[in-house]
Image (spheres, rainbow, N blue to C red):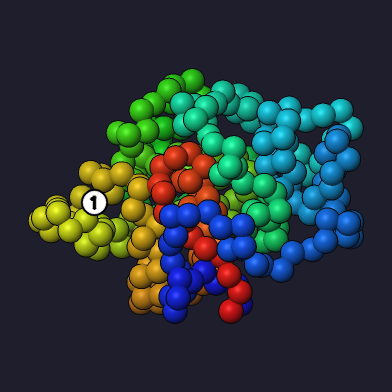
Amino acid sequence: MTSVKEETSVLGTDEDESPNSSKSRRRSKRDLQGRTFKCGCEKMYLSYPALYTHIKTKHDGISPPGTENPHPMTNRGRGRPRKTQIGKEEKEETKETPEENPLEELQINGGQTDPIIGFEDSNSELLNKIKEWKDKLIDDFFDKENLSCDDVFAIYLIEIARIIEEDAYKNFVLFFENLRICLNLRGYQMHSEEKLEKINNYCVLKGPEKVPGIFNYYIQQFMPLNFPSFNKDFAIRISIHFDKWLLKNNLTDMKIILTED
């Protein structure tokens, strides 16, 4: 099973990029079987998210002539949004390539999904944050130094909702709703200088820079006790994808390392 570890942990973090840290088994790029998503530059992919990521990173979001997409995104919304301040500050060395996308093989391509679906509690703080950011993301610039965990979770879910199908998105909602609970209970233990009386407000008051540091506890201990039916491998892949997104947007220095058991 694919897992993430640092020494004996399932999930670990590392602040340094390592070209040899990812050893997951991948299909050969020359193996075209099942690669039905074709970019106009002749590259072929297994899923729409992979093609979407390629076009976004290699062609500035503009599909070259000849691009073939068996499952095009719907025409809802206002099209491709302008880049936010975070997007403009992306570093080339942390950009995610389709081959490194841990969600690709799950075949959850789809979109666009409404990011406010999947919440059992209509008063969810995360749901309210998504509603707050849903329209602002198109045109507004924002200071990432002032973003809370809730802000960042909401922005990430809005972006994810654009490229995956509805049922998969609901699992992302469940993952982040429970991650909020976990962080509010234990997040301040990652900040030795903080007082624990703030314990229930971590996701409101603190930024996302230390969030990857709790993934080991979250997946190894919190999830089995609080929602054991959630697929562990899927949770690991969400964690890896989210961490890559944080790194790409300069919101953390902590990197999760993908290895094989």
**Coordinates of residue 21 in the picture (x, y in percent):** 58, 63
In the displayed structure image, the side of residue 216 where residue 96 appears, left or right: right
In depth, the one of 197 and 133 nearer the eye is: 197
| Residue in the picture at 48% in, 46% down | 247
Q: Is residue 160 visible?
A: yes
| Residue in the picture at 72% in, 35% down | 58
Callout 1 secondary element: helix
Quadrant of the rendering where the N terminus is positioned: bottom right
In depth, the one of 73 and 31 nearer the eye is: 31
Q: Amino acid at mark 1?
A: Tyr
**Coordinates of residue 180 in the picture (x, y in percent):** 33, 55
In the displayed structure image, the side of residue 220 where residue 65 appears, left or right: right
**Coordinates of residue 222 in the picture (x, y in percent):** 35, 71
Q: Which residue is mark 1?
A: 202
Q: Quadrant of residue 46?
A: bottom right
In the displayed structure image, the side of residue 226 where residue 98 appears, left or right: right
Q: Quadrant of residue 155?
A: top left
Quadrant of the rendering where the C terminus is positioned: bottom right
